[in-house]
Image (spheres, rainbow, N blue to C red):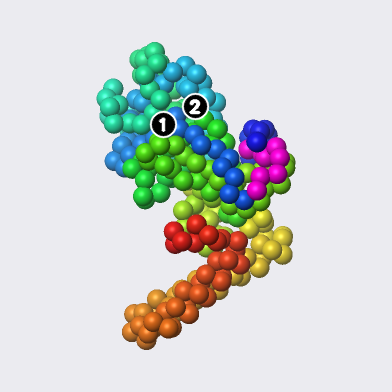
Amino acid sequence: MYEIRTAGLKGLGVFSKAFLPRGTRIFSEAPLLAIRSGQTAGDIYSASRFLSPEDKGSLLGLSTHVTNELKIMRWSQAAWYTLTNTVSEIFGRKGRGVIGWPNPKEHVTVLNIFRNNAFNLGASSLFQQAVFPRISRINHSCVPNAQGNFHDEMGRFNVHATRDIEGGEEVTLNYLQELGTARESRQERLWGGYGFACECPACDLSLERARQGEKRRVKMHEELAKYVEGMASGAVLVLEAELEAVQRFIRLLEGEGIAGRELSTL
Ligand SMILES: [Zn+2]
């Protein structure tokens, strides 16, 4: 259904091997490591030491990012002193690995990998962030063709096509949780969080479509600001006006190619 191969400057990426109709489940995968809110860098490394050699290999094979190195070093240094061997609460495929002594160099690498590859699982999940053996290879796009949902009971992350995907096309997910954010703030968040500058079709302003999309987003924010202002002054408390504002908002989002399930979660 898919293959993992080089995606140019982005490193590796996931590409479809055949036409995938909208709605196709492309991946269903259990995390290598997942953390709940409140768990720390120390927990991530502790859990990684319990992985089987195979899973550890697949974790260490994921990408790191040099631009984040200094930040990670500081984070790692702080976490190193709080390192414990208790991993009872962490979700992962622990159990078959040989547990070695903590190793400072590996500690930095594991944290760098986690930081660079972890997905936010959303507010409704028990887990906050997780790294996956193959799903973590999926690159970001601000106009993605797939969407992931973590299923708490199954303990799996399911990735579905949100539109038809042509054979040979790269499969992409949106790493950012909010929708309709302006280009500048997306770029800032992606650079700060993941260490890359996005060059997706919505970010490449040499494309007419990207310029139009950016205009729509600015318009959407103006509409929302007007709406919030109206709410504050009590002028839009009439149901009809409210409905119209929501419909306008939906039309703008649909212009962005955002619809269906994503829209209902909004
Ligand atoms: Zn982008």
| Nearer-the-camera pick, 74 or 158 | 158
The residue indicated by pointer 1 is 33
Question: For the residue with label 1, is its CB less than 8 Å from the closest atom of ligand 1?
Answer: no
Amino acid at pointer 1: Leu
Q: CA distance from mark 1 to mark 2?
A: 9 Å
Asked if residue 230 is positioned above or below residue 46 in the image, the reply reads: below
Q: Earlier in the sequence, mark 1 or mark 2?
A: 1
**Callout 1: SS:** strand
Amino acid at pointer 2: Leu
| Nearer-the-camera pick, 39 or 16 | 16
The residue indicated by pointer 2 is 59
Task: Look at the image and give the residue range highlighted in magenta.
Answer: 14-21
Residue 99 is one of the magenta-drawn residues: no
Asked if residue 71 is positioned above or below residue 45 in the image, the reply reads: below
The answer to the question of whether label 1 and label 2 lie on touching residues, with beta carbons closer than 8 A, is yes
Position of the N terminus, as image quadrant, is: top right
Q: Position of residue 230 (x, y in %)?
A: 39, 82
**Callout 2: SS:** helix
Q: Is residue 152 visible?
A: yes
Magenta span: predominant SS is loop
